[in-house]
Amino acid sequence: MPWTQILERAVALSASCRHEGEVADYIPALADVAPDQFGIAVATLDGSIHSAQDSQTRFSIQSISKVFLLTLAYHAYGESLWTRVGQSPSTNPFNSLIELELERGIPRNPFLNPGALAVTDALLSRHTHLESAMVAVMRELAGNPDINYDSDVFDSELRCASRHHATAHLMQSHGNFSNEVGEVVRAYCASCAIEASCVELARAGLFLANGGRDPQGGRQLLSAQQAQRVCALMLTTGTYENSGMTAFAIGLPTKSGVGGGVLAVLPGRGTICAWSPRLGASGNSVRAMKALELISNAAGLSVFA
Ligand code: GLN
């Protein structure tokens, strides 16, 4: 079946859940987003893009930025990064502190908030202007020089960042933190506040499907083995406590964000990015996850196929 037809079908069939879930409102600026929007884009390694609905509308990438933070840190530190953060799934929510204390300040994985803050701390030791480095890498990979972070979303998250501060201080108390907590939290919130569309994010993720090399610009961001490992973490931890269900229903490495975006990797083939702001209880977009399930099943895309 051609991509256009697969996408049209996913748009039609996922419409039944278009009013399910709630927009994230713990970051006040995200609560203002029109809740029923939906976009989807497929990018393939040969350079084609197939898209439908609001695929050009920019949204807050939120935790999808954790994939790009991890990529920069893994590139900079290699395997020694894993002394700071683990590679195991968690059954707790993305912002939980429970395991962090029990496990002596080593976060379970880089896609939980504690893990992403540890990764951001590691990166800040290498980049004085991490916010600009993150924006620059997103511009390069998405192929669009006007990508930026939204300052309202950034300010809004920073105003209610007590839990981020608590997380960072807890890691600091266990000796797993190097930089000034406030600076790390700022760089993390700025990365989460980057805005991109489904088309741009699908393009930006292509290096993960291509042995770590950006097929457009040609830059090797990760080694082939590192790219495989990032995908393994996306499959096992990318949608938090739902990751097992995601592997079962979709069968692809995916990373979600509370802006409603979900980026999925089709190893060796391309990427899919789906977006719809209404979230289920674990913070994953209800309609975007449904659309990915329909597409993966219709086209036999599971990595286990
Ligand atoms: N910036 C959000 C937070 O740290 C990202 C969470 C998410 O997208 N799951 O809470």
Image (cartoon, grey):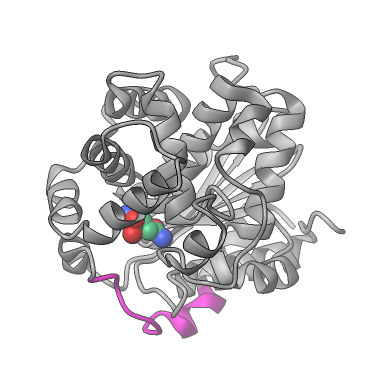
106 or 298, nearer to the observer: 106
Q: Please tell me which residue is depicted at 45% across the width and 30% down the height of the picture.
A: 122
Name the side, left or right, on which 173 lies relative to 235.
left
Quadrant in the picture for residue 54 = bottom left
Q: Which residue is the extreme one toward the top?
A: 218
Query: 29 left or right of 47?
Result: left
Magenta span covers which residues? 12-25
Report if residue 30 is visible in the image. Answer: yes
Give x and y (percent) for residue 266: 70, 46
Residue 208 x, y percent position in the rendering: 64, 35
The x and y percentages for residue 173 are 38, 48
The x and y percentages for residue 224 are 75, 27
Q: Vertical placement of 166 versus 18: above or below?
A: above
User: Does 109 lie within the magenta span?
Assistant: no
> To which quarter of the image does residue 300 belong?
bottom right
Of the pair 158 and 28, the residue shown nearer to us: 158
Q: Is residue 65 visible?
A: no
* Ligand 1 placement by image quarter: bottom left
Q: Nearer the viewer, residue 236 or 210?
A: 236
Seen from the viewer's position, the closer of residues 196 and 103 is 103
Residue in view at x 51 percent, y 29 percent: 73
Answer with left or right where residue 159 lies relative to residue 227: left
Q: Is residue 22 magenta?
A: yes
User: In this picture, is 54 found above or below 120?
Assistant: below
In the rendered view of the protein, which quadrant contains the N terminus? bottom right
How many numbered marks appear?
0
Residue drawn at x 23%, y 35% as measured from the top left: 183
The C terminus lies in quadrant? bottom right
Q: Is residue 86 left or right of residue 119?
A: right
